[in-house]
Image (cartoon, grey):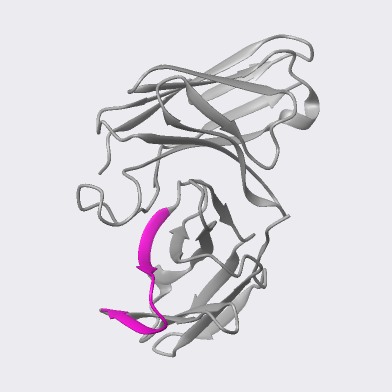
Amino acid sequence: DAGITQSPRHKVTETGTPVTLRCHQTENHRYMYWYRQDPGHGLRLIHYSYGVKDTDKGEVSDGYSVSRSKTEDFLLTLESATSSQTSVYFCAISGGTTGRGGSTGELFFGEGSRLTVL
Amino acid sequence: QKEVEQNSGPLSVPEGAIASLNCTYSDRGSQSFFWYRQYSGKSPELIMFIYSNGDKEDGRFTAQLNKASQYVSLLIRDSQPSDSATYLCAVNLAGTYKYIFGTGTRLKVLA
């Protein structure tokens, strides 16, 4: 199994409070991703990173920011949480596309972080 | 907005039958396609990837890709109750590091 750890695994917070979710990997993979999963919407990409300090927006980035100061850590921050951000958040990593160190480009997922915003 | 479409199901098949799961995508330039399985309350896990037109087999699973029709499918032979899960189709968007997912098809294998 890919070494991906998400923390916290469960969090309940109140509207308007800041929240930070952490993704830590031990695989030295270049690419890291944050998705949210909601019933009826599947997995939606929030932000992703293609290297230290290199990040870009996904489909549903409004209200979220990310940072990657080290290869192994990718942080997702909700500056002021809202009830619409209640979701399960998954971190994923990838070694890149075919040919780069033998990686076939698939994503490996962490265990997920369940966030409830009251 | 690039999209991946899947029928949400549930798709119910009897044990031992072939389950056929389908996925269409809108990004004509996409080259990499993935099938994930997700059990309730768990994270997605990779079943197969496919890059070339045609069929790719791995045990009881066969992925089929038709780039002209922008269509990917997953066949599960000899379906088992343990195959009951949600199956997610994912596409790596051409020229990007982004992967987008369909909403998933829930499969129920009836014993």
In depth, the one of B74 and B2 nearer the eye is: B2
Left or right for B36, reference A3: right
In depth, the one of A28 and A18 nearer the eye is: A28
Residue that extends furthest to the left in the rendered view of this protein: A101
Q: Is residue B85 above or below residue B22?
A: above
Q: Position of residue A73 (x, y in %)?
A: 39, 20
Using the rendered view, name the quadrant where residue B46 is placed: bottom left
Residue B49 on the magenta segment: yes
Using the rendered view, name the quadrant where residue B12 is placed: bottom right
Which stretch is magenta?
B45-58
Count the labels in the image: 0
Residue B48 on the magenta segment: yes
Residue A42 seen anywhere in this rendered image of the structure? yes
Q: Position of residue A31 (x, y in %)?
A: 40, 37
Residue that extends furthest to the bottom in the rendered view of this protein: B17
Tell me the quarter of the image containing the C terminus of chain A: top right
Left or right for A44, reference B50: right
Magenta stretch, overall SS: strand
Residue B60 seen anywhere in this rendered image of the structure? no
Residue that extends furthest to the top in the rendered view of this protein: A17
Tell me the quarter of the image containing the N terminus of chain A: top left
The residue at 68%/61% (across/down) is: B3
The residue at 69%/32% (across/down) is: A61
The residue at 36%/86% (across/down) is: B78
The residue at 34%/34% (across/down) is: A30
Q: Position of residue A27 (x, y in %)?
A: 25, 33
In depth, the one of A112 and B98 nearer the eye is: B98
Q: Is residue A75 above or below residue B6?
A: above
Q: Position of residue A103 (x, y in %)?
A: 26, 52
